[in-house]
Image (cartoon, rainbow, N blue to C red):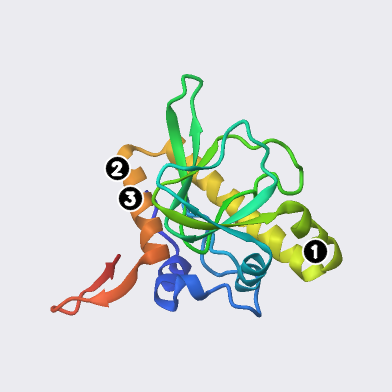
Amino acid sequence: MAKFSQSWYASIVQGKNNTNSADAIYSKVPVMPWIHHRLHPILEKLFMKLGIARTLREGEKIFSSKEKIDHVVLVTKGVTGRAIGSTSGETQAIALSTPGHIAAGNLNFFSGRPAAGHYFAITNAEVVYVPQTILAGLAKQDRFINELLQVQFELASLSDRVGFCCLSLLSTEDKLKALTSTWALNYGTMVYDKEGRKMIRM
């Protein structure tokens, strides 16, 4: 697998989850697979204000594959996933969403088309459901909110695309490297061992 850019390594040091500051909508953290980009702080406050909180048990569905997705769902606690299956019903790929990330509702927000896959809680989780109609109405009224939403959904789509590229093109060893690198970027902290060597603690 190719070496990551200097901006990727720098993002670990500067604090990946804090790069979406309230005064900037474009993060300097590179898009990585499997974990969608963290929700912008302004959108997070908006979601918490307008949304309906729900507690989910492990394995409980957020949306099924045949259900209409008419809410954008934010994870506030636990881990959720979106599974894409084969024609035989076996799960071939899972996209993860952790606290501060969107669990569902971003892929069909503007088009209103049915979404593929099914959405569920991987662990016991807490989520917030925000009606798409309310967010769409705000987006029409507020240009800044509209831009924030579009950037957020674009980052999620890019993450999906990179993830599917990894699944399609990489060897098993490189897939594991990509997943480890992604987890390090989102949840790693740069530390030094007793010999002074740099390490990433996750």
* Residue 199, image quadrant: bottom left
Choose between 127 and 174: the one closer to the eye.
127
Label 3 Cα neighbours within 10 Å, binned few <14 / some 14-19 / many ≥20: some
The type of residue carrying mark 2 is: Glu
Quadrant location, the C terminus: bottom left
Q: Position of residue 21 (x, y in %)?
A: 59, 77
Choose between 105 and 174: the one closer to the eye.
105
Choose between 10 and 139: the one closer to the eye.
139
Q: Which residue is mark 2?
A: 173
Q: How many marks?
A: 3
Left or right side of 22 for 164 = left
Classify mark 2: helix, strand or loop: helix
Q: Which residue is mark 1?
A: 138
* Residue 66, image quadrant: top right
Image height of 168 relative to 7, above or below? above
Residue located 38% across and 58% down the image: 183
Label 1 Cα neighbours within 10 Å, binned few <14 / some 14-19 / many ≥20: some
Residue located 64% across and 35% down the image: 67
Classify mark 1: helix, strand or loop: helix
Choose between 12 and 150: the one closer to the eye.
150
Q: Are marks 2 and 3 in contact (CB under 8 Å)?
A: yes
The type of residue carrying mark 1 is: Leu
Q: Which residue is mark 3?
A: 177
Q: Position of residue 61 (x, y in %)?
A: 51, 41
Q: Position of residue 73 (x, y in %)?
A: 60, 54
Q: Are marks 1 and 3 in contact (CB under 8 Å)?
A: no
